[in-house]
Image (spheres, coloured by chain):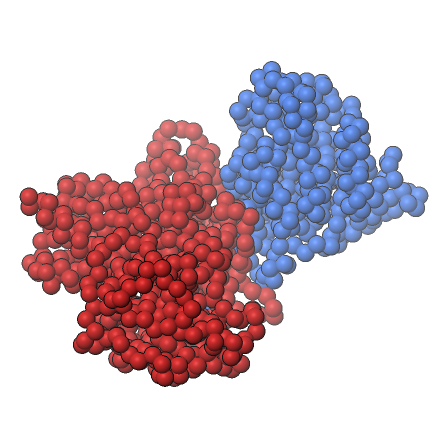
Chain colours: A blue, B red
Amino acid sequence: MTATTTRPTNRIGLTTQDYQGGTSTLCAGCGHNSITSQIIAACYDLSLDPATVLKMSGIGCSSKTPAYFLGKSFGFNTLHGRMPSVTTGAMIANRTMTAIGVSGDGDTGSIGFGQFKHMMRRNVPMVYIVENNGVYGLTKGQHSATADIGQHLKYAGTNVLPPIDICAEAIAADCGFVARSFSGDAKQVRELIKAAMSYEGTAVIDIISPCVTFNNEDDSSKSYAYGKDKEERIQDIQFIQSYEEVVVDYEPGSEQIVKLHDGPTIKLRKLNRDYDATDRWAAIKLLEECRQSNIFVTGLIHINESRPTLQQTMSLIDEPLAYQTEAQLRPSRAAFAAVMAEF
Amino acid sequence: MTSLDTVVSAPVIDPNPPVINDFTLVVATENGSGSQTANNTLIRAIFKMGVPVSGKNLFPSNISGLPTWYTIRVSHQGYAARREYSEILVAYNPRTSDEDLANLPAGGVCIHPADMKFTTPRSDVVYYPVPVKDFIKEIAPPQHLRDYITNMSYVGVVTQLFGISRVEIEHALMHHFNGKRKAVDLNLRMVDMAIAHTVAHLPKQDPFRVEPLNKTAGKILIDGNTAAGIGALVGGVGVVAWYPITPSTSLVDAITEYAPKLRPAVDDRVNYAIIQAEDELAAAGIIVGAGWAGTRAMTATSGPGISLMNEFGGLAHFAEVPIVIWDIMRMGPSTGLPTRVSQGDILSAYYLGHGDSQHICLLPGDMTECFAYAGTAFDLAERFQTPVLVLSDLDLGMNNWMTEPFEYPEQPLDRGKVLDTGSFAQFLADHDNKWGRYRDVDNDGIGYRTIPGNQNPRAAWLARGTGHNEQGVYSERNDDWQRNMDRLTRKLDTARRHVPAPVIDARPGATVGIIGYGSTADAITEARDRLRAQGIETSSMRLRSLPLNEDVRTFMESYDQIYVVELNQDSQMLQLLCAHAPKDAAKLAPVNLCDGLPLTATFITQRINAHRTSVKQ
């Protein structure tokens, strides 16, 4: 943590360098690398202490990325599709941490679908990023569960099954923070990550992140060209720290201000649609309309802060369970004797 | 129960002289009819009379309707193993009554509802008909309690016929109903009505009697899952994640029941978490996350769950994360016999996961060990930064056993080599400013672990199931891989010297050795007594853990013929013993049973005698 020379520092005196990880081994131009950069930028902007962050992932190209950011944070590159359960355990063991997990469309939409849904059902506090490219990269180009129906790939042939919509699944599971973005939209990705990291509960961000090697043809809904051409932001998103002033810029009704639990604010400037992100029914409707009309909307699709987190549901103490001492963990002799006397 | 058994010819019972404190009673009922209350009442009353007693429930995988047998063995010698036949039958299940009656030895006793018709009545057994319907009519219990109260009629008849203390019956009911007088009185009414009827109308015609002894003073009756649940709480459990599966469910139930008493909430907040997961994959994942983050984390499951936990077993082994998995073994393969006992997971547990992995396994053999190993498992998991599997079974876990009360542990928790922010700095100072998560500094194969929240910027590491070097950094280098695997082997060898040693009973002059483990201990003890009476002295070794150690080799060297007793088809422990001491492998002969029932002493003696005869020929 040597804040040195002329590099700018954040509120805890760290430079962006302090949030870097190892060198990426993904393909040049991979959308995932852009997201990695925005995770680094978001953590820097939030002045997060790397010692308080857990980096989690499953298996796949996307799941390699925690090695490429926050080199001073603890992390766990778990099993294919099993990031949710491991994160659940870690966040129960130490509720004071902030967890950011990176998964892919195969890791989430196929092998890990059950765990994904149950994590949201439990409302495990974590940022859950899906780097969604619609294709299996590491095994060289099979269709994933989010691939477009009718899409043709050189290796895998034609995809005959409809895609799973990660955001629709999240809303169905009553997830309280559901967003979609595009890895080419750096600012939106960054603001969403900052908002997600400040949200109390499971925050899902489905980020279309093109695979330049296997799925970047212009007609693919997961390609750069498609994203640049078709992206329709539902709002301009600005994340405002608790210590910053919230300036209302626009006509009444054109902005939605969402105050988060610990003081920060998300400012959503409405664009073409009159959309209320707190309305779950509106979210379902929006996603269905966009599915039917092939519209690629991005932004904060749904936010709801009313659900208790898993730690709250379980009435856990504020301190990490992991730091409980022997005196706190081992029953008293009197309590033990009383139990033995029952037999 | 006998209908499920291999046929063993039962002796003809002489009505004289009296048979005191040495018989077995089987209660045949329908599953879901509430007979457990009645059976537990009888067991507890006999136990409180100072007479050693054990109960085994042979129940179907069903909520209600299928037949259930509960055997109560009364033994002044303290034998607790199952027997092949029972002298006394409580025939309360019309669907099995003919078969149950047929299985009674000549001179045996049949207690039955007066209106029960036997297709082929026997003239060589004693009948005690009970007018159950008349009793029920007179008591007229609420409909939902009818079955429970009905069963109390046999409690009354058995109490009077065999001399069980009416006072202890009442105490047992008070215990069962937590002192709720109304419930106790309703049940007692039936008991007393049946006692009065027995006195008036059922003159004693059999030799069986319970007489007070002083052999249970200070002891308790408990099942292994409850013992383990209490043990886990005493052992400092932080996170329990599980998925319901017979026969392990009652272990987590026990944690849930006793946690508020042993680890009371402070301001309505607790320092433990019990999570019912969506499946065993997630249960294993949750404890891997919790163990990595620094808590004592455990799950309880059985064979099918072990299959699902394979991938996390491998990950926890390779990323070196402490977790504890209780496997309450039931009969496999596949769904198998969910409510029958087995020791069939020895190999799959020991080698859990693909690739090369061997795990520390604990093999509790009695209630004390079910309790104590809950804590030992956490200590070993954290000391060796690895999964520890505790292989109990349905017989230990779900049946009532007599035991000394458990002792409050005097040893502190062993949290292993964990560096916190302060000790991490000290470690760097002491080790040339070098630390790597997987560096073998002490030459015992065990690295120094840091957990999330450590403030030192150099303390963080990325856990992974992929190839890694000593720093925990991804590596595909062959030398990194080999060095890591060699270290894991070294770690297992260190563990070999730390896990619970086998219990050896070496007898002078013995040329025969018997090796067993787990729930077969009582049958082995009883079989050895019988073999001794027959003129065959044996020494025994009860294994209590894996990996096997040097004591095992020494024992195998010391005897000409060694029998390996276990409840599985493939002689799984025998396979491990052969690999461990190939020089003496030829001495090993299997005494294995895979029929779903707890082992009997007779099975062991018959198999050993048959083997000895065949070897001589």
Q: Residue at x 54, y 41 (%)?
A: A82
In the orientation shown, which residue stands out farthest toward the top?
A154
Q: Is residue B206 left or right of residue A342?
A: left
Q: Is residue B452 above or below residue A168?
A: below
Q: Is residue A239 left or right of residue B607?
A: right
Indicate the quadrant containing the C terminus of chain B: top left, top right, bottom left or bottom right: top left
| Residue A30, position as x, y percentages in the image | 63, 25
Q: Is residue A243 above or below residue A319?
A: above
Q: Is residue B315 above or below residue B262?
A: above
| Residue A4, position as x, y percentages in the image | 61, 41
Indicate the quadrant containing the N terminus of chain B: top left, top right, bottom left or bottom right: bottom left
User: Which of these two is toward me, B6 or B299?
Assistant: B6
Tell me the quarter of the picture where residue B88 sits: bottom left
Does residue B408 appear in the picture of this structure?
A: no
Q: Residue at x 71, y 24 (%)?
A: A221
Q: Residue at x 37, y 65 (%)?
A: B91
| Residue B607, position as x, y percentages in the image | 18, 51
Q: Is residue A338 above or below residue A229?
A: below
User: Which of these two is toward me, A174 or B159?
Assistant: B159
Instruction: Tell me how many marks there are.
Output: 0
Tell me the quarter of the picture where residue B267 sits: bottom right
Q: Is residue A20 left or right of residue B203?
A: right
Does residue A107 appear in the picture of this structure?
A: yes
Q: Residue at x 68, y 42 (%)?
A: A170
User: Which of these two is toward me, B317 or A141?
Assistant: A141
User: Which of these two is toward me, B614 or B282?
Assistant: B614
| Residue A230, position as x, y percentages in the image | 78, 25
